[in-house]
Structure formats: C-alpha cells, structure tokens
Image (cartoon, rainbow, N blue to C red):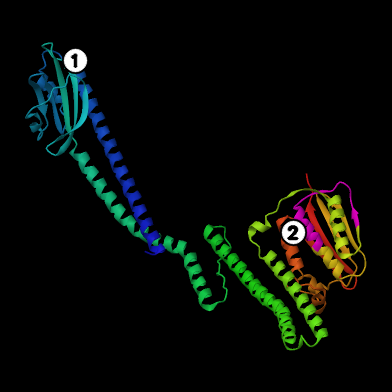
Amino acid sequence: MKLRNRIHLYTTVLFVVLLVLINVAVYFSFSRIMYSSELEQTETEAEQIVAALNSNQPSLPVSKLLRAYVPVNGIVQIVMKDDVGPGSASPGYSSLREGSIPFYPEEVSKVIDYKETKHAMVSVPIIWSTGEVAALQVVESLKTTERNLQVLQIVLIIVTLVAIIPLFISARFLSNLITRPITSMTNTMQEIRESGRFKQLDLPEKSSDELYVMGETFNEMINLLQSNYEKQEQFVSNASHELKTPLTVIESYSSLLKRRGRQDAELFDESIEAIHSEAVRMKDLTQQLLVLAKHDEYWNADITDIELGAFLQESVRAFEKAYKRRVEVFVEEDLIVLADAQKLKQLLYIFMDNARKYSEEEVQVEAYREKDQAYIHITDYGIGISKDDLVRVFDRFYRVDKARTRKSGGFGLGLALARDLAQVMDAELHLHSEEKAGTKATIKLPLSQ
C-alpha cells in the first residue's frame, strides 16, 4: 500500500474511532444524567408522601392519602415484610402491583427494568400503624426518558455518518499534502538517475514548516552531491593527467634503455636519472593523494596547549637544516595556542616550502596575539600570485604557473591539504599576495584560556 493511501486510511479510521468514542461518551453521560435526575425527582416525591403520612390524621384512610400523591406514570404503595399493604396506581400502571414485590428495610433508590421498560424505584422505610417497619415504595416509568435517549442515539449516529464525508475528504487532502514533497523528491531522483544531470526541487514560498525544511535540505544535499561529483571528476582527471606524464617518461626511457642502453653509457646514465626522478615525483604525488583521501579518523585532531614561541623556533630550525634556507622569526612572548602539534607543524612546512620555492629572498615568520586569537604570518618576497589565481589556489591540482610548478616539483595539492588541516584544528587561513611583490600566508589559531 502506498504511503499516501496508508496515511489516508489510518487518519480516516483514527478520526472515525475518536468520533464514535466521543459520541458514545456523550450518549452514556447524558443518559446517566437524565436517569439520575429522574431518580432525584422520585426521591423528592417519596419524601413528600412520607411527610404527609407522618402528619396524617387517623380519620383519613391511607389509601385515599396515597391516591392523592400517586405519580402520573407509576404507583405508590406500602410494602410489608410479608405482605403488600395499601397503594394506588395511575391509569395503565396497575400491573406494577402484580407479582412479587421485594421489601427493603433500608432506603433504596435505583433504576429497575420491568417489561423491557426502565422505571425509577424509591423505597423509604416507615413505621406502620401496627408498630412494624414497612416500606413506602414509589415507582415511576421512564418511558419518556428512554424515548428521548433513543432520539439522541439516532441523532448521534446520523451526525457520525454525516461527519465521515468531510472527514474522508480532509484525510485525503492531508495525505496529499504530506506526501507531495516526498513524491516530488522521488520523481526528481528518478529524473536525476535517468538523465544523469542534477536537479533541484521547486520549492513554494519560504516557510518554517517541516515539509519546506525537508525540501530545502534535499536541495542542499543535491548541491553538495553535485559539488562533490564535479570535484571527483576534476580530481580523477587531474590525477590521471599527473600520473600520465611520469609514466610516459619512464616508458620512453625504458624503451631507450632496452634498445641502446648497453651500447651508450651516457644514455644509460641519463635514462636512469630520469626514471629515478619521475619515480620520486610519482611517490610524492601518491603520498599526497593518499593523505587527502584518508578516512575521517586520520583527521581527528589532538588539541593541546602549545607554547608557540618554542614551537616555531624548533620547526623553523628543522626547516632551515633540511633546505639550507634562512628563515627569520619574530614571535611575541607567552603565546599559548590550542592546536594539534603534528598538524600545525605540517601546515607551517607547507607554507614555508611554498615561500622557499617561489622566492629567492629571506622568508619571514611572525607570530603575535590580537584579542583572543594568535596570528602567524609566513611572508616571502617572490613572484606573488595574481588576483584571478588567488581565489583558486586552495583547489586540488590547481597551479598558478604549470611550467614553473612542474619544474619545482609541485602538484597543486599542498594548499588543498593545508585547508583540510586548518579545518580540523578550527584554524583560519588567509592568503594576501601581489604579483612580483610576494605572498603573505596567515594562520589564525585560538588562544588557550
């Protein structure tokens, strides 16, 4: 069964059951009130008769007195323990005195069934003239009350049946309203699957209800999927392109070695050097690709307090020994930041390595505090980056000058990796650059409290 039909069925059944329960509760509550009212009225009549009997003069027969108080639709009688005393009945109700009549030594008030008709019966104990305890019983027919309750029952049944029609229509409308966004999403996903092109839902006017939020979330997910799909295509294309070149070089030199390597020593040395160089490039490229493709657990940051002055001095010292390049350091005292030491060192190496590659002059590293953040600047005075390229340098495989970067060994992955490292440490990255003037990379880190 479709969700729309299921919602329609369940909603209709639920509301019908609730309506029936409400009507049943109304009927029984109303009938109880009416029967209680009739019993109270009969009790009042019985009390009046008892008061009249107590004040009666001996000269007035009891039967005449009872005849004066007989109800219009019942009887009044005196019941002894072993016999039935005098009584009086209204026309048509004399049969109530026939048969066995129970004696109640205590006061009783209840509704009884007699000949498939309900009656209000009240029994009040009195002291009879002989000194024994007798019971004054007043019985009234509730036929009129039963007839009124039957009318109420018919009215409630009709109201229930009539209410089912708009209830059925409204349940259908509700089910369509709930399932419309789901149907729209299903159709959109089928179109995406068949056409291979991403498509968004056409949302109505902005709203805060859950259905609109679900549609908006779906559109955001489609945007994310489209973006990731495009990046994946670009990533695969660029990666295959980057790997194609060294493999082609290795294949070419291998063929030369196979043909003439044994006869030409100079060609042999040149081929071995080229193959080794391209193999190193491939190794570096695959290592960076593997880092970028690591699972989420690799990117879990171990955030600790880091004394930035000593940390920068140690990192710069290791960098200078590795690349034989001087780096000038200026650090404000007592700077303690929150970061992952390993990832922060890797981030610093990426920016210092770029500064080394694209400038011939001294590299500067500066750190200071501003409000509740620490700023680290890595500055070079090299060739710089144009404004058009600056907005894309964090994209994977993007290179400002492809000939130059290939010569220097870059793949366009360093800044993409730096961006990911910064994100897991809750750090911010900014690049400011001018062509032929240099580049300043800024790392913003939260200060330790």
Instruction: Report if residue 342 lies within the magenta region.
Output: yes
Q: Is residue 271 left or right of residue 150?
A: right
Between disc 1 and disc 2, the foreground one is 2
Q: Position of residue 70 (x, y in %)?
A: 15, 27
Identify whether 111 is placed above or below 413: above
- Image quadrant occupied by the C terminus: top right
Residue, x 80% and y 78% (percent of image)?
A: 273
Residue 395 seen anywhere in this rendered image of the structure: no
Residue pointed to by mark 2:
422
Return the residue nearer the eye: 262 or 446: 262
Amino acid type of the residue tagged 1 in the rendering: Asn
Residue 118, quarter of the rendered image: top left
Mark 1 or mark 2: which comes first in sequence?
1
Q: Secondary structure at mark 2?
A: helix
Residue pointed to by mark 1:
54
Q: Position of residue 238 (x, y in %)?
A: 69, 76
**Neighbour tally class for label 1: few under 14, some 14-19, many 20 plus, Cα within 10 Å:** few
Identify whether 30 is placed above or below 302: above
Magenta-highlighted residues? 329-349
Amino acid type of the residue tagged 2 in the rendering: Ala
In three-dimensional space, the C-alpha distance between marks 1 and 2, rounded to whole angstroms, equals 104 Å
Identify whether 145 is placed above or below 348: above
